Image (spheres, rainbow, N blue to C red):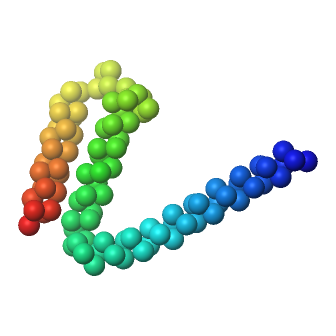
Amino acid sequence: MAKRNTNLMTGCLCALGCETLFGLSYVMTKWSSAQVSALALLGWRFVLGALVMGLCAALGLVKLQLKGKKRRRFFAWRCCIRCSISSARRWASA
């Protein structure tokens, strides 16, 4: 019975933490959209997502299977990432 109560308490605390983060995300979005343009926020969102995905792939957390794939497409994808990062830097400095 004590194990069940511990699991219930852990679940409740996790739910409380998730709801807190979810609620704070609205506050942060409202604050950041007042400070920065929507296009800059969108650009940083995709740049940050690409960096996190690349880091996960580099650390081996996400398995990428590139055998048999055309290298040109992979190279084109890397060029797009570099262009988006340089565009985001230009928007941030403007």
Question: To which quarter of the image does residue 14 belong?
Answer: bottom right
| Residue in the picture at 21% in, 34% down | 73
| Residue 48 point in image, percent of width and height | 29, 51
Residue 34 position, x and y percent, is 28, 78
The residue positioned 36% from the left and 76% from the top of the image is 30
Q: Quadrant of residue 9?
A: bottom right
Question: Is residue 1 rendered to the left or right of residue 59?
Answer: right
* Residue appearing at x 29%, y 74% in the figure: 33
Q: Total of numbered circles in the picture?
A: 0
Q: Quadrant of residue 76?
A: top left
* 62, 67: nearer the viewer: 62
On screen, residue 69 above or below 13: above
- Locate the C terminus by quadrant: bottom left
**Residue 28, image x, y percentages:** 39, 70
Residue at 63% x, 63% y is 16
Q: Toward the viewer: 49 or 32?
A: 32
Residue reaching furthest to the right = 1
The relative height of residue 68 versus residue 79 in the rendered view (above or below) is above
